Amino acid sequence: MSNVGTAGRKGPAVRSDCFVSLEVRKSGGLDIAATSRVDSMYGDSIQQLCRDVLEGLGLQHARLELEDAGALPFALMARIETAAARAGITASFLPEMKSYCTDTTQRDRFRRSRLYLPGNDPQFFINAGLHKPDGIILDLEDSVAPAEKDAARIMVRNALRQVNFYGAERMVRINQGAEGIRDLDEIVPNNVHVVLIPKVESAEQVQEVDTHIQNLQKKHKSRSPVYLMPIIESALGTIRAYDIATASENNVALALGLEDYTADIGVQRTLEGRESFWMRSMVVNAARAAGIQPIDTVFSDVADKKGLIVSVKEAKALGFDGKGCIHPRQIAPIHDAFAPEKSEIDKATKIMRAFEKAEAQGLAVVALGSKMIDPPVVKRALKTVEMAVSLGRLPENWREEHS
């Protein structure tokens, strides 16, 4: 009597992944048969890692067959655990939490670019942070087949514990409903920064996710903030945008998805975007009224750089702070298009100097020429200056240059 579970991928085109077949037995000890493309360098280490995971899962009698295509330890461990779960084993095996995976995030930070990565494809995780996106989204929803949701959940959990994203905000897009709650059980204890909630049509959807996160934080004694980014993708969600934006104090941004929205209203999505202008304006205004960031949808044509730049500049003109990416080559053009122009930088520095001068003199009213400057204008100017400095368009000592 035995139970068999399989997980992963195999074949000549597979890289940075592996295929695992695990048979749980009643006797015979642990039998490991592993082949690897990197066997000459890491064969002994792979054998030992397989044994460590099996023993960590509480298995004493099992046969494991591994076909490795260069999987890193976090991916190999995830595949073995998934195969074990599919064979009826309920235990988990948590890899070590690397020091570079323990950083936290801030509520108010740049979210110009967020790079989507399919949650069940570890090959894309490894170098994603080197491209310097503001955020990396490990996606558990649309990019993962229903039969692979369990595998992706474990893979993403392990990535949160072991992959260096080089300062990018650590985001995860969860599934809807009960599947999304199971996603939270795995990712919240493992230092996710932002949870993206898909296809939101009510404040209650946000609040259900927020409440479960808070309960998990109490259970695991976690003090690191977990922020929320609801995604609006339907006509009903758009109409309720402000209620959704204000549903939780942990909301930091409001995003939108145009593929589902245009399907919902029965039109084709176009490059010009006339069919979504009302929806995008609603999202921007709801986010601004709620004091959070509005984030635009992805640009789906990876090869059309000119179209991407036009789309980003339009998004910026509408009031968006960021845009989604589906390929690393989109990151730099997005950052460049969202960057402030020289005229914007000059105006922002004038506002900041006037504000700081008035503040130093203890004045309650700030004026620039004949115009009064209110706090939102100062806040926007500060953000412009900070972005200009971060992009090298303004020196860090800009105050001294005009003193």
Image (tube, grey):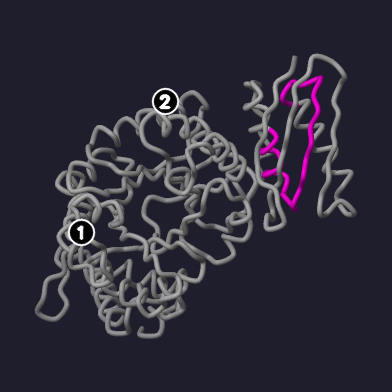
Q: Quadrant of residue 319?
A: bottom left
| Relative to 285, residue 149 above or below | above
In the image, is 274 to the left or to the right of 255? left
Q: Which residue is mark 2?
A: 215
Does the image show residue 223?
yes
Q: Which residue is mark 1?
A: 267
Q: Could you tell me which secondary element the residue under label 1 belongs to? A: loop
Number of marks present in the image shown: 2
Q: Residues within 10 Å of mark 1 (few under 14, many from 20)?
A: few
Tell whether position 4 is magenta.
Answer: no
Q: Quadrant of residue 88?
A: top right
Coordinates of residue 96 in the picture (x, y in percent): 69, 38
| Relative to 118, residue 384 above or below | below
Question: What quarter of the picture does the N terminus occupy?
Answer: top right
Q: Residue furthest left?
A: 370
Coordinates of residue 394 in the picture (x, y in percent): 41, 80
Residue shown at the point (41%, 43%) measured from the top left? 195
Range shown magenta: 56-80
Depth order, front residue of 2/341: 2
Residue shown at the point (54%, 39%) measured from the top left? 148
Residue shown at the point (78%, 25%) measured from the top left? 55
Depth order, front residue of 289/144: 144
| Relative to 104, residue 310 above or below | below
Depth order, front residue of 312/291: 312
Coordinates of residue 249 in the picture (x, y in percent): 29, 40
Tell whether position 57 is magenta.
Answer: yes
Does the image show residue 357?
no
